[in-house]
Image (spheres, rainbow, N blue to C red):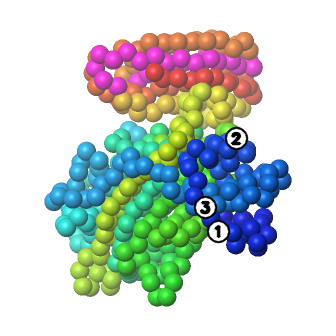
Amino acid sequence: MRVSRIIAALLPAALIAAVPCAYAAEDSDKMDYTKDGAVDVFDLITAKQTASPADVIKVRDFIMTGNRRDYELVWSDEFDGTSLNMDKWSYELGNWKLDENGNYITGGWGNNEQEFYTDRNASLKDGILTISARRENHSDEVQGNYEYTSSRLSTQHKFSVCGGKIEVRARCDSGKSLWPAIWMLPEDSVYGGWAASGEIDIMEGWGSTPEKICGTIHFGDVWPGNTYLTGEYTFPGGDSTENWHTYSIEWDRSEIRWYVDDTLYSTQSDWYSANRSYPAPFDQKFYMILNLAVGGHFDGVDGIYADPSIFADGSKDFDIDYVRVYQRKGYDFKPSEIRSESLSSYMEGSSASLTNKDGCSVFSIDDAGSLEYGIMGLLNARKVKAGETHTLSFDVSSDKTREMLVTVEDSSYNRYLNKKITITPEKTHYSFAVTFENDMSADIKFQLGNIGDASTLGHHEVTLYDIKWD
């Protein structure tokens, strides 16, 4: 429900018609009746119950206008010059979705997309970034042959932000199977894999219906336990994504708002991350992505294929004038502290499940199987440099006494830490320092398969608390 519709439901017409006033940023503290760091509809509800009519009007005006004024620019790219600024952007290449170690997960970026992303389909001219989708043959010795190319750019590892206002001015050619997107993913998936750690779609467009776009958040649990909330905007009077428009979000601790040309069209606040405290997952840093997909489930023919006819006259272009990121003055929205790192799991020949919660990870084991590595909790692909010493620390308990193997390994399974410990119902603290001689990607593994007599234990639970890799 839009903020304006909520306000209309809460206030009499006489108050809605009152003339808005301007308020200083410091006034927001006085209007934060719920003391959650944001002035939003929840403060309006509280003000209506406890404050004077004049104060109710102040809260309403601040929500409608004030929240949108008090921002300062913290990062931008105006796309001046003749080449992409590689200090700000990276190319994401190919058609395959890979894990942290570069291993194949699925083709089509998980969406049945038909394009192969290259570093040749993005160009700058006259202050405009153009991402061009083309119908052309492209062969890759690993990923195979493709009939379409495009580009996908991201700021991962170069810029990320928690909250604020993100604004992009853009336009895109139309045509069935085109999928322009301006979106964000978490810099660190601290709540688990997609979509437990969230996704924010600032703008997605259907090439077949350029008269509308949508803004969406994905959240919940790791796929397939994920869910989403979305809102659509329809351009008035024959307008479309083919013309220049400004797409933006305003992202606070308890609310995200979507705009087209300063028109609010969607507000979301009812999100969650499984077994985590609100406002997870949208209380961490996210990075930007710009891309133009071809085909796929969003607008592809039969949810898969590209429509070759739209390329009869050449490439299809997604043009971006600028990307600007603002932070609200005086509004302290820092990433929430993570007490315990989330583990991913690997199971083979066993029967077990892993649940990540605030502060701990719980293994529920019915059958440990026959392999030592048949049940594992993982911290994958942690980048380390030669000469660095990192410390793995955690507390652990098990409702049945058993052994656990803790290792730190490279991609070739060479072990830099190899410790077998006995875990009991009493919570016990462990800390291990690991020094690396080479730059590498390290995998931390908590192995709970058939170690010692674990295969004879039957059902038991193992809980790891306050996992940290420093």
Residue that lies at the very extreme toward the bottom in this rendered image:
238
Residue at 64%, 68% in the rendered image: 19
3 and 2 marks in contact (CB < 8 Å): no
3 and 1 marks in contact (CB < 8 Å): yes
Residue bearing mark 3: 21
**Is there any visible trace of residue 98 in the rendered image?**
no
Q: CA distance from mark 1 to mark 2?
A: 26 Å
Residue bearing mark 2: 35
Label 2 Cα crowd, 10 Å radius (few <14 / some 14-19 / many 20+): few
Residue that lies at the very extreme toward the left in this rendered image:
82
Q: CA distance from mark 3 to mark 2?
A: 23 Å
What amino acid is found at the position of numbered circle 3 in the picture?
Cys
In terms of secondary structure, what is the magenta stretch mainly? strand
Q: Quick check: is 407 in the magenta stretch?
A: yes
* Residue placed most toward the observer, 469 or 425: 469
Residue bearing mark 1: 19
Nearest to N terminus: mark 3 or mark 2: 3
* Residue placed most toward the observer, 256 or 175: 256
Q: Position of residue 322 (x, y in %)?
A: 33, 61
Per the image, label 3 sits on a secondary structure element best described as loop
Per the image, label 2 sits on a secondary structure element best described as loop
Which residues lie in the magenta part? Answer: 384-409
What amino acid is found at the position of numbered circle 2 in the picture?
Lys
Residue at 41%, 18% in the rendered image: 390
